């Protein structure tokens, strides 16, 4: 079985090796700067600084009333930031890549990023509890700790992560540059669309951009865990294949009684097939082995057509090729001349 597995692996083409991005000094510096920007936005909102006043000015400006012709188009464009549709689209593309390259890394990277997104953004949303512009109660207030869940913007952070995964998994520098530009454009447009519609403050969008970028920058730290998870999944698959392709138990042969054909002489003597369903085993001298019909009787196989049938115990048959004489006790018929 192990030989078959190695032979199958030898026939399959080797997947291209994809080097995981490393945490360079530039990436570490970018991560630290983004984290500082993230904390600064949260602090500015908590103390109700000039950023909160800017939020109110943009909200009272009501962009959806200033440019109403853009509203139908932006209602559909904002779907690019919803987690459900974008995750399904990206998962289909990465699933095709995983199948072509014989690796689970693209799907595992997507799953890890979405898990980090739900944990980090969801925890901050519920912890700060900020209300949205449509539910604000006091002009100039930060609307914090009021039971809301819009700070940071989930649409914006999701757009940064899901579309940024394509650039993160790119295999060439040129593709990485193009996909990074596409990701930045989509996430920027989705964030500004939520401000236009009035579902988010401007500070919500700024914090959502920072939250999504932090997740993308932190992914290299999770690459060893992703590699171990992939190896474990492949090992479990091979074990399942070995168990599925193991030796199956042979079917048990039917050892029930076999029917025996009766000769005409037995039928005339009043015997029936039920009486001789199982032939009697004749006694053999010590040291002798059964042959011919007796051997087949011991093995459970029926006698071949034309061979001598096995007579039941107590029934005597005349020897073959001899003429049957008169039975004992019967009167002899007198000889008469012809």
Image (spheres, helix red, strand yellow):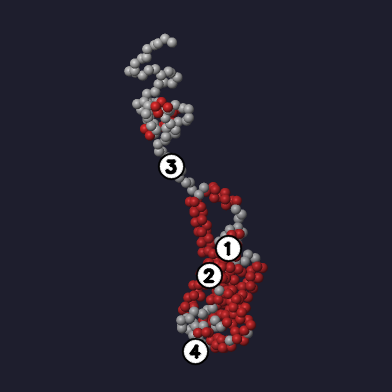
The crowding category of the residue bearing disc 1, from other C-alpha atoms within 10 Å (few below 14, some 14 to 19, many at least 20), is some
Q: Quadrant of the C terminus?
A: top left
Which residue ends up furthest to the bottom in the rendered image?
A: 139
Query: Of the residues under marks 4 and 2, which one precedes in the sequence?
Result: 2
Check if mark 2's residue and mark 3's residue have beta carbons within 8 Å: no
Which residue matches tag 3?
Answer: 252
Real-space CA distance between mark 4 and mark 2, rounded to the nearest whole angstrom: 35 Å
Q: Which residue is mark 1?
A: 95
Sequence-wise, the earlier of marks 1 and 3 is 1
Q: Which residue has dot 2 on it? A: 114
The image shows residue 286, relative to residue 78, as above or below, that is above
Closer to the camera, 143 or 71?
Answer: 71
Viewer-side label of 2, 1: 1
Q: Residue at x 37, y 14 (%)?
A: 333
Q: Earlier in the sequence, mark 2 or mark 3?
A: 2
| CA distance separating discs 1 and 3 | 45 Å
Q: Position of residue 78 (x, y in %)?
A: 58, 76
* Farthest residue, direction right: 174
Q: Residue at x 42, y 28 (%)?
A: 263
Residue most extreme to the top: 337
Q: Residue at x 59, y 78 (%)?
A: 75
CB under 8 Å between callouts 2 and 1? Answer: no
- The mark lying in front, picked from 3 and 4, is 3
* Mark 1 in CB contact with mark 3 (< 8 angstroms): no
| Mark 2 secondary-structure assignment | helix
| Circle number at residue 138 | 4
CA gap, disc 2 and disc 1: 15 Å
Task: Answer with mark 1 or mark 4, whichever residue precedes in sequence.
Answer: 1
């Amino acid at each position: 079985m192990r030989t078959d597995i190695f032979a199958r692996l030898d026939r399959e083409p080797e997947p291209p090796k994809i080097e995981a991005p490393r945490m360079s000094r530039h990436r570490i510096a970018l991560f630290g700067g983004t984290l500082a920007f993230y904390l600064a936005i949260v602090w500015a909102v908590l103390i109700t600084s000039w950023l909160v006043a800017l939020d109110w000015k943009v909200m009272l400006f009501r962009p959806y009333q200033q440019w109403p012709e853009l509203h139908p188009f932006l209602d559909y464009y904002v779907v690019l930031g919803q987690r459900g549709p974008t995750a399904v689209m990206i998962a289909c593309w990465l699933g095709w890549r995983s199948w072509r390259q014989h690796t689970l890394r693209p799907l595992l990277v997507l799953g890890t990023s979405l898990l980090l997104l739900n944990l980090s953004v969801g925890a901050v949303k519920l912890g700060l509890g900020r209300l949205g512009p449509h539910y604000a109660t006091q002009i100039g207030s930060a609307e914090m700790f009021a039971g809301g869940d819009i700070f940071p913007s989930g649409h914006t952070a999701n757009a940064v992560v899901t579309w940024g995964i394509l650039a993160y998994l790119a295999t060439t520098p040129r593709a990485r540059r193009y996909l990074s530009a596409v990701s930045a454009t989509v996430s920027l447009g989705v964030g500004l669309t939520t401000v236009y519609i009035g579902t988010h403050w401007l500070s919500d969008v700024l914090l959502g951009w920072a939250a999504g970028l932090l997740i993308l920058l932190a992914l290299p730290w999770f690459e060893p865990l992703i590699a171990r998870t992939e190896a474990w999944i492949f090992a479990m698959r091979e074990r399942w294949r070995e168990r599925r392709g193991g030796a199956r138990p042979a079917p048990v042969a039917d050892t029930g009684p076999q029917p025996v054909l009766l000769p005409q002489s037995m039928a005339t003597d009043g015997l029936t097939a039920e009486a001789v369903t199982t032939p009697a085993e004749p006694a053999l001298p010590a040291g002798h082995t059964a042959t011919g019909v007796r051997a087949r009787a011991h093995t459970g196989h029926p006698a071949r057509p034309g061979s001598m049938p096995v007579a039941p115990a107590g029934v005597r048959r005349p020897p073959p090729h001899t003429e049957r004489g008169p039975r004992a006790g019967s009167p002899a018929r007198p000889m008469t001349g012809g």
